[in-house]
Image (cartoon, helix red, strand yellow):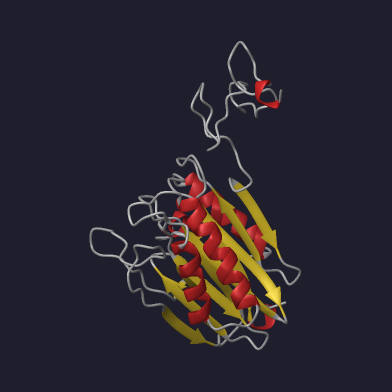
Amino acid sequence: MAGDTYCEACGHALGAPTCSSCGAAAVDAEGYCERCGLRQPTGRDHAEIVLPGGAAAVTDKGLRRSRNEDAVSLLETGGTVVTVVCDGVGSSPRADEASAVAVETAGAALARGLPQEEAFELAGRAVAKLATSLDDAPACTYVSAAVARDGRVTLGWAGDTRAYLLPGGSLLTEDDVVETGEITAWLGADAGDVDLHLRAFTPERPGMLLVCSDGLWRYLDGYAFPATGTPIEMAREMLRHALDSGGQDNVTIVLIPLGESHG
């Protein structure tokens, strides 16, 4: 019988996933090995995206976290490059699900040409639907960018995920945090009324837009950004810097060429 296909020695189903560390067929539905406790690697542990025009993204779980609760979307449509980066709030349940559904929803909305406010609202609704109650409400921070063919950049953000203008490393966003470091704005069923911060500008000279989670920007004080290389090469170098500096959090990095270098 189908329900009887289990091992009489260990009790686990025949054909069950095996642990990448100890080899036991004891991986539960949440991806943890019931024998050694290791969370199994997923496709989100490390991922890269490179668009034909050169824009690139890298996301990595870092060195101290068991899973990657960051998520990133990077798309190009009609000559406009759009990206969304969300960082799951670690104190909330299933934070990785919140960030994943937020970037998927907002990224698709921006790619359809919807304004920043509407994309943010749709993402907020999608994250809120994940909650079973206010005590079980997945949450994430949010930052999005759209770079048009004419070079105009529009940004939208809530939380402590950031955007910078390179070269020079000028910070383009402000964090929604209090002095204790507590985040005061996020997406989720328990978020309350959250105002989306907006900024639009056209760069005066060619450069690069950096969008990243705190897994990178916490290590940027005094950091000399890469001056040469393709966007993906530069993103990988920034990731190495974050890991070499401790890698205490998930790291997500997006680089989009601006001005004459765009496309």
Residue 207 x/y as whole percent: 59, 77
User: With 169 as the anchor, is 9 left or right in this view?
Assistant: right
Tell me if residue 20 comes above or below residue 74 in the rendering.
above
Residue 255 in view in this figure: yes
Q: Which residue corresponds to the image point at 68% horizontal and 59% vertical from the top-left?
A: 49
Position of the N terminus by quadrant: top right
User: With 21 as the anchor, is 121 left or right in this view?
Assistant: left
Residue 254 in view in this figure: no
Viewer-proximal residue among 251 and 246: 251
Q: Quadrant location of residue 74?
A: bottom right
Q: Which residue corresponds to the image point at 36% horizontal and 73% vertical from the top-left?
A: 194
Q: Quadrant location of residue 131?
A: bottom left
Viewer-proximal residue among 4 and 43: 4
Residue 53 x/y as whole percent: 73, 72
User: With 52 as the anchor, is 104 left or right in this view?
Assistant: left
Residue 170 x/y as whole percent: 45, 74
Residue 215 x/y as whole percent: 45, 54
Q: Which residue corresponds to the image point at 60% horizontal and 27% vertical from the top-left?
A: 19
Position of the C terminus by quadrant: bottom right
Q: Quadrant location of residue 25?
A: top right
